Image: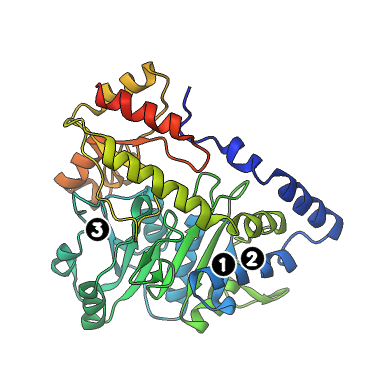
Amino acid sequence: MIHFLDLQKINAQYAEQLKNAASRVIDSGWFLLGKETEIFERKLAEYVGAEPSQTIAVGNGLDALRLILRGYIELGEMQEYDEIIVPANTYIATIIAISDNRLTPVLVEPNIETYNIDIDRIEEKITEKTKAILLVHLYGQAVWSEKLEQLAQKYNLKIIEDNAQAIGATWNGIRTGNLGDAAGFSFYPAKNLGALGDSGAITTKNPELAKTIRALGNYGSERKYHNAFRGANSRMDEIQAAFLSIKLDYIDTETATLQSIAEYYCKHITNSKIILPSFDNRSHVWHVFVVRCKQRDDLQKYLENHQIQTQIHYPIPPHKQVCYANTPLAKLHLPITEQIHREVLSLPISPVMTMEQVKKIVEILNSY
C-alpha cells in the first residue's frame, strides 16, 4: 500500500531530536508561555520575514484566524456584520473564523486553473461594509498580485492571509505570511510544518494588533489576573513549540522534495482524463497535489484497488455544509467551486515517498 501521507515515517526522521526536546521540556517544569515558545516565535519570524514581537504562537490554525479578526474588532477597525471577502473554494475553517466573529463572509469564486480566489472577481463584491480580503494560499500555492494590492489600497481594505497550507511559498521573493497585514498559520500534524498535535501562529505588521492578539489568546490578559478583554485560551504549549523549532530547520529541504515529486507528476502523467494542477515551483510548496477528473469517484476506487491511498480536498464546499444551511450562504450558486469539489482528487505526496512509489502511481494513472 502506498499511503497518502505516512506521518509516522516523516516524524521518525527526527525521532531522537523530538524525544530529547520532550525530555528537556518535561525536566524544565515549564509548559506554557516559556522559553521554547519564545524560541519558536523568533525562528518562525526569521523564516517568514516578520518581526519576532509580532509573531504569536497560538493553539491552532482556526484560532489564528479568529484572533486576527477579533483583534481588528477590539481595535475598532471592524464591527459586527462587516463584510470579509473570502474564497468560496477553501476549507470551512476559513469561513468559520469569519462567522464566529459575527462578521459576514462574502464568497468569491476561484480561478479554475489554480483553485485559488480569482482576483479579477473581487472588486465586484466590494461594498461600503467590506473591511478585508481573507486570502487562502490553497494547496500550497501563493495567491497574490499587484492588482490585489491596488484594490486593497483603493478601498482601504486589510489583506489577511490564511497561510495554513503554504509555509515557505513565495511571491516576488516574499514569503507567504509576510505579504498582507496579518496571517494565520496551522501546524496541524499533516501540514508541511506539522506539530505532533494542534498548534498555530499569527504574524502581523501591526504592533498594536500583535499586542492585542497576544492578550486575547491568553484570556484577554497581558498581566496575570488583569483582563483587558473577554479573551480566549489559545496558547501553543512548550512541547509543541520545541518540536516545531526542530522541524522548521528541515522545512526547505522537505519542500524541495515535494517540488521534485510534483514536477515529476506534471511531466509524466499524460492521461487526458486527468487534469493536472497549475504548475509553478516558485510559488507552490505542494501541501497537497490535486488533480481533477470528471470520473473522480471511479478514479479514486481504481487507485484504491491498486493499493494507492488518495484523499479529497474537499468533498463539500462551505456554502453547501449543513452548518450554514439556515444562512444566506446556502442560497448561493457557485458553479466553479461546485465543479472543483465534484472533481478534485489528491494524490500521495510527501517528503518520505520514494521515486519508485511516485513512478508506480504515474504508471497506474496513465493506464486508467
In the structure shown, which secondary structural element does the residue marked by tag 2 occupy? Answer: helix
Q: Nearer the viewer, residue 10 or 323?
A: 10
- Disc ID at residue 347: none
Mark yes or no: residue 34 visible.
no
Q: Residue furthest top?
A: 305
| Image mark for residue 117 | 3
At 22% across and 41% down in the image, what residue appears? 340
Measured as percent of width and height from the top left, residue 296 is found at: 25, 28
Above-or-below relation of 232 to 300 = below
Where is residue 157 drawn, in percent x and y? 29, 77
Looking at the image, tell me whether mark 3 or mark 2 is earlier in sequence order: 2
Q: Estimate the spatial distance between the alpha carbons at disc 2 and disc 1, rounded to whole Å.
A: 6 Å
Q: In what element is the residue under mark 1?
A: helix
Front label number (3 vs 1): 1
Q: CA distance from mark 3 to mark 2?
A: 31 Å
- For label 1, the residue is 44
On the image, numbered disc 2 is attached to which residue?
40
Q: Amino acid at mark 1?
A: Leu
Q: Nearer the viewer, residue 69 or 134?
A: 134
Quick check: 296 above or below 213? above
Q: Are marks 2 and 1 in contact (CB under 8 Å)?
A: yes
